[in-house]
Amino acid sequence: MKQNLVAIAAMALLLVPPGCGSKEKKTSHPAGITTVVQHSVDISYGDYTTETFYNNGKWFKSIGHFKNGNRFYETYVMRNDTTSIIQTTSFYPSGNLLRTEMRVNNEVTMAQSFHENGQLSVERNVPAGYERAWNEDGKPFFENNDLRTNNRTIYSWYANGQMKELFELSGGERNGKWFEWDSLGNQTRSEMYVNGKRKK
């Protein structure tokens, strides 16, 4: 869960418009290309450097590096008169993949986040209508198979790998099944909920 929050915080930082760094150096190149180098500090990862590229004043690429020289992120921007597509890939300081994301007109359409061990953490696919998350050991954390309704199935697990709890949420309330098991796999709860209230 900590990695998921880190990924979200990192993406919030990466999508701040260019030009918000603390130290900045601007360089002009032939054919209308301008680069701006910024030195900034991230809450989770410390010092990093960003090189942002503009073509005739329009942002089209940013590349960030950690202090150790490893990539922090790469962002590419494609646009026409009606559509902008922003593709961002970010990394842990170790160099392992942290997140990939595609935004269309500033709305996230597809994204994947990873735990530092390489295990997929969160996968969101808006066109297909689903979002799913996994623990570091690959066990499901939650799944939402219809983003339009924001219905989720939540899972939790014991350290021995036995499922501990499974319940369904809709609109932030329990709706549907709620099952619990002890660490040996014996079921200790089997209930149904409607609009946050237990069905008798």
Image (cartoon, rainbow, N blue to C red):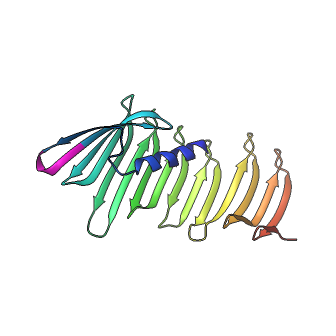
> In the drawing, does residue 136 fall left or right of residue 63?
right
Q: Is residue 47 above or below residue 19?
A: above
Q: Position of residue 131 (x, y in %)?
A: 56, 59
**In what quadrant of the picture does the C terminus appear?**
bottom right
Q: Position of residue 169 (x, y in %)?
A: 69, 64
Occupied quadrant, residue 159: top right
> In the drawing, does residue 11 fall left or right of residue 164?
left
Occupied quadrant, residue 193: bottom right
Along the viewing direction, whichever of 111 and 83 lies nearer the viewer: 83
The magenta segment: 30-35
Along the viewing direction, whichever of 90 and 187 lies nearer the viewer: 90
The question of residue 32 being in magenta is answered with yes
Residue at the spot 20% in from the left edge and 53% down from the top edge: 55
Q: Position of residue 191 (x, y in %)?
A: 83, 64
> In the drawing, does residue 73 fall left or right of residue 152?
left
Q: Is residue 19 above or below residue 178?
A: above
Along the viewing direction, whichever of 42 and 134 lies nearer the viewer: 42
**In what quadrant of the picture does the N terminus appear?**
top right
Along the viewing direction, whichever of 163 and 61 lies nearer the viewer: 61
Residue at the spot 41% in from the left edge and 57% down from the top edge: 102
